[in-house]
Image (cartoon, grey):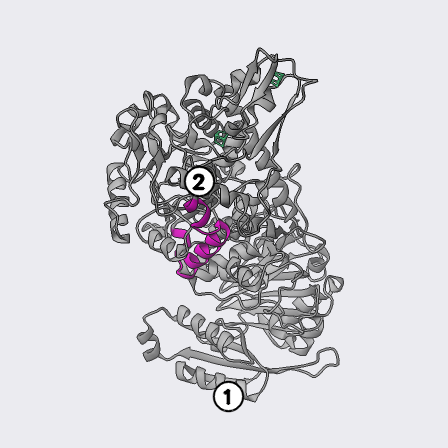
Amino acid sequence: MLREGEVRIPSGCAISGFFSRSGSRISGGTILKSIATMHDRSNGLGGGFAGYGIYPEYKELYALHVFYDNMTSREETERYLDRRFDIVNLSRIPTVKTSEITDVPLIWRYFVTPLPTKLANEQIDEREYVARCVVSVNTKIDGAYIFSSGKNMGVFKAVGYPEDVARFYRLEDYSGYCWTAHGRYPTNTPGWWGGAHPFALLDYSIVHNGEISSYDANRRFVEMFGYKCTLLTDTEVITYIIDYLNRRQGLPLKDVAKVIAAPFWSEIEKLPEKEKEKLTYLRNVYSSLLVTGPFSILLGFDGGMMALNDRLKLRSMVAAEKGDTLYVASEECAIREICPAPDRLWSPKGGEAVMAVLEGEKSKV
Amino acid sequence: MIDFLYPEYEIVRNPDRCIKCRACERQCSNEVHKFDPELNMMTADESKCVACHRCASICPTRAIKIVKTDHTFRENHNWTNETITELYRQASTGGVLLSSMGNPKPYPVYWDKILINASQVTNPSIDPLREPMETKVFLGRKPEKMEFDKDGNLVIKKYPNLELSVPVMFSAMSYGSISYNAHESLARAASELGIYYNTGEGGLHEDFYKYGKNTIVQVASGRFGVHKDYLDAGAAIEIKMGQGAKPGIGGHLPGTKIAGDISKTRMIPEGTDALSPYPHHDIYSIEDLRQLVYSLKEATAYKKPVIVKIAAVHNVAAIASGIARSGADIIAIDGYRGGTGAAPTRIRDNVGIPVELALASADERLRREGIRNNVSLVVGGSIRSSSDLVKAIALGADAVYIATGALLALGCHLCRSCHLGTCNWGIATQRPDLVKRLNPDVGYKRLVNLIQAWNHEVKEMLGGMGINSIEALRGNRLMLRGVGLNEKELEILGIMHAGE
Ligand code: SF4
Ligand code: SF4
């Protein structure tokens, strides 16, 4: 059986997420309830969550969540990390044994900060340093896989139905200002936990529903810039595109959305001169990062969340607002389950980004 | 010494149908047909026939057909009829064999061993009749880094780019090698379609300066017809380093074709052979190329992209990467099937490599080096249909060049006798009586039809793949599968085998 990454596995999916703009911390149990209503959109072969604001006591440290196949890979990884980071805290991630979740790998968590001397030697910024170390572990150490690497956020995922995954990780013990969730419906059995979603790099995490037709064009473009698509999933490549455009090129997320789900030329033609010039420029320069085919994605990042549909809206996605909280899900029922009477409920247009940020945060958008 | 070569093609005339109108006699520039008053019948000297089908096409009673002769030497797989005949010809003349159009030999055509994907179940196909389907592309350099002003607004850095409504351009064919009317047809079609045609190395006739917005002006080793106004007239400048039909050697236009306006446009005396030098004598190395690229840019105030065209040769990937670093905005790669107005037969048939492989390895190399977005890749030689076009884009091309295909649309019948200068279809000739057979009003329309037809087909294939913009197909090799290719071929093409 080929493992995820050795073969490309198309998947259908369910996604759900919410974001409190005031930063109120909401229990992981809430997202469990929401995603569980869309049980039939998953088939038990992958589920996962990302929570933001869940580690306030360590908010200045990178939280690394790691899957290990065995003790050897763990020891090797820890030696690697030890040479590059100050490891402030390490432990197994608490889980509960359940009959639904099987083939459990070793799951560890590290709170780390880059060693200042190492960082200074490399002459790159801190985030780039962390990103390179993560990619290095994932591609070079056999049996080790860092699946979460942001500050004050964490990804929890496994092979199973999302509600079982949530119980397995005791998600109700965490609370955060933002949660996203994913239930996967792959067309063949990946059987590997790393292949479940969300996919994350630094504080960016993505849950995605769809199968993009531009995959190889996108992959071959971002791989020019040091990324290595090892999972061959859409989610992975979309995360790298966002990381490249937002973090490395400095493009605000609203413009990143205009690259990924670029407006049609016929629409660009109709815009005022300045806007037209800018969008023509972005489409021309990053034509290889246009993502086609059906997708709905929820991007979580430090202090914000963005929802985006492909430009033809080939996948369902509904948004709602209640008070300061934004809800987005594949189906309305997943929102109603946790927010029965929203102030506003709508179906965002294809290519139109829906964004929420913490009050007072504007930097990335 | 008996020096007899049996004609390759025979003219079969049905006497029951022939009405002796003598149209074939009047129309054949090779003087094949004659009326014999004594016998009161039409006769033919087939030794002069080039199989261009002019007579068969215009015969009012459909009395003529051209067939391959079954006259043969004793069969021999090593010494074929063709090999023997060519050897006799050289023994009698002592000359280099000349040919035209592209390499006709039975080497593999990789386009025909590649298949395209379509969506089923897991993602939807997109219906081009009901949804927008985009084929616009820009060719040229892109900035490597986004820049922002102090208020955080995006700074727009404009490199000169070509905008194409469809990723197809008419490849270089010089005025001289083809006729005025052929050039006019190409220029008008390019303008109407929102694409570009290429002057080739023969300069630009003053009547066609008005199509400059859709013209690529070429600078080749002979520098024929190159001057400031010429460079300024075009939308882009192409430096021709090589041509797929004859890699390593220069252009060759027989003196018979250098008449009147052509000598004026080329700025050389009438009747002289126009032989371009093999290399550019100011380019013996990659750093010299850089100087020419920048002198052309200086001369045109950095307003026009510079294309460097090379023949697909063994080391094409490394050469392409060198060119990308030389300041060129676009690299054009011409495969060994590419056409020509005249080339030594041995070179045409034995030098160069297939463009499919050249494209795949050049695109991959540029990506490995992280510079693929600094240049655009255009390939030609030969793209025969919209499916070749789709496969080329999916392998990694930004656009394609077509020339033989464009001439076919203008009536060319691929008789491969362009070097004789007596093209019966008014294309590869300068004889006024022949040139006027090609009506540019009709010719340009046929070119427009061809590209529009291809564009429709491209959109259908894109839609089938669930893609609604051609940009998302560029380099999208997962959309391709090989059939009947070995592992090495698949590895070079960067595609999987069908069924994988
Ligand atoms: S054109 Fe046809 S009908 Fe007329 S003379 Fe020739 S073969 Fe006969
Ligand atoms: S252009 Fe004319 S001479 Fe050349 S191959 Fe075509 S028909 Fe023959």
Q: Position of residue A318 (x, y in %)?
A: 66, 52
List the residue tagged with mark 2: A275
**Res. A290 in view:** yes
Is residue A56 among what the camera can see? Answer: no
The chain to which mark 1 is attached is: A
Separation of disc 1 and disc 2 at Cα? 53 Å
Mark 1: which secondary structure? helix
Position of A97 with respect to B496 (left or right) is right
Q: Quadrant of ligand 1?
A: top right
Q: Residue at x 49, y 21 (%)?
A: B31
Q: Which residues are magenta?
A: B346-374
Determine crowd level at label 2: few under 14, some 14-19, many 20+ residues with C-alpha closer than 10 A.
few
Residue B262 lies, with reference to residue B308, above or below; the image says above
Task: Tell me the amino acid under the disc marked 2.
Answer: Glu
Residue drawn at (48%, 24%), measured in percent from left and top? B30
Query: As drawn, is A360 to the left or to the right of B276?
Result: right
Is B16 above or below relative to A68? above
Classify mark 2: helix, strand or loop.
Answer: helix
Residue designated by label 1: A75
Q: Nearer the viewer, residue A350 or A172?
A: A350
Looking at the image, residue B457 sits to the left or right of residue B375; the answer is: right
Percent of width and height locating residue A186: 69, 64
